[in-house]
Image (tube, rainbow, N blue to C red):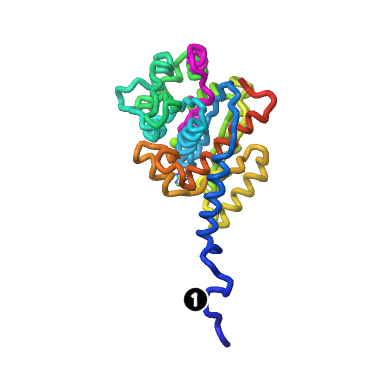
Amino acid sequence: MKQPDETEAPASFSFDDSPIARELADLSARRKALEHATVQLTGRTRVLTISNQKGGVGKTTTTVNLAAALADRGARVLVIDLDPQGNASTALGVPHTAETPSVYDVLIDEFPLADIVQVSPESPNLLCAPSTIHLAGAEIELVSQVAREHRLRTAVEDYLEGLEERIDFILIDCPPSLGLLTINAFTAAGELLIPIQCEYYALEGLSQLLGTVRMIQKHLNPQLHLSTIILTMYDGRTRLAQQVADEVRAHFPQEVLETVIPRSVRVSEAPSFGQTVIAYDGQSAGAIAYREAAVEIIRRDSATKEGNA
Ligand SMILES: Nc1ncnc2c1ncn2[C@@H]1O[C@H](COP(=O)(O)OP(=O)(O)OP(=O)(O)O)[C@@H](O)[C@H]1O
Ligand SMILES: [Mg+2]
């Protein structure tokens, strides 16, 4: 029997039909759409905590790239690095050696937040409250402190009160645990943003996270709500990624952003240059996705009649 010749292209084949050509055309259309997209900031400060007790799901990557994309849209953004690993501080190009005044001093010694905030070299709109290695001890030191769950909230409120210029967004990058640092973030924030990695076990642990959120709502911060889920490290070539994305969307139809963050080498390379992907390669697929996510997040809030202050 005659076998089909696999090397032979179909008669109608042209380079324009290839998957790469289609992907490039799609990306260029999305770039154009972004150029024309208009957004309106409300003038109100939105505080989002980026949390998931699962490690390595893209919390820090999402925090810094979203922050940079929001800043690029004209928003003034403060990133609070609440993870002793200090990855967000690194990615924003902000010094965070052991001697640097940091979030540790705010939580334990009640330093004003304004005293530790640094401006990222990337943009005057992008601020960072750095973490240092000392924060690793804060989880235990906080246990014996007065108002241990409210320390960050109080610091943020005092900071916002004393500011001359408005801040549009505060993004808090949490460590991969549900300890007192994360609880401080939940108490300080109005919104919870959960990054979910498109892989097996993606939804595992989510019910524990949401259970903790319900406890916080009941006892510490009734305003906190799950506003946003962002799918990260998506690889459209695998069926698993598509299945996970479909499943998450089925469970959380309102919360999941339309924008999906693709797995991209540029995104993973950027931090080693002390940069976000927006500065490192602003037209790459990962940067475009984070820019689209930023637009969606701004628009979702302007579409809400009453927000959480
Ligand atoms: N879209 C992406 N494409 C490629 N690599 C990515 C992407 N997002 C994240 N990564 C990589 O995955 C790893 C984990 O990401 P990240 O540090 O953001 O996760 P995390 O949830 O903050 O981790 P941790 O729980 O340790 O704080 C990093 O090496 C990061 O560079
Ligand atoms: Mg992290």
Q: Is residue 248 above or below residue 39?
A: below
Q: In the image, which residues are magenta?
A: 156-180
**Badge 1 density bin: few <14, some 14–19, many ≥20, Cα 10 Å:** few
> Which residue occupies 53% across, 45% down?
31
Q: Position of residue 270 (x, y in %)?
A: 39, 42
Q: Is residue 307 magenta?
A: no
Q: Is mark 1 within 8 Å of ligand 1?
A: no
Front in this rendered view, residue 247 or 162: 162
Q: Quadrant of the N terminus?
A: bottom right
Report the amino acid beneath label 1.
Thr
From the viewer's perspective, is 23 left or right of 128? right
Q: Is residue 171 magenta?
A: yes
Residue extending farthest to the right is 305
From the viewer's perspective, is 303 left or right of 86? right
Front in this rendered view, residue 303 or 89: 303
* Camera sees residue 205: no
Q: Is residue 115 above or below residue 195?
A: above
> Which residue occupies 46% across, 47% down?
284
> Which residue occupies 62% across, 40% down?
256
The residue labelled by disc 1 is 7
* Camera sees residue 138: yes
Label 1 sits on a secondary structure element that is: loop
Q: Is residue 7 above or below residue 36?
A: below
Q: Quadrant of ligand 2?
A: top left
Front in this rendered view, residue 305 or 283: 283
> Which residue occupies 54% across, 54% down?
25
Q: Position of residue 225 (x, y in %)?
A: 62, 28
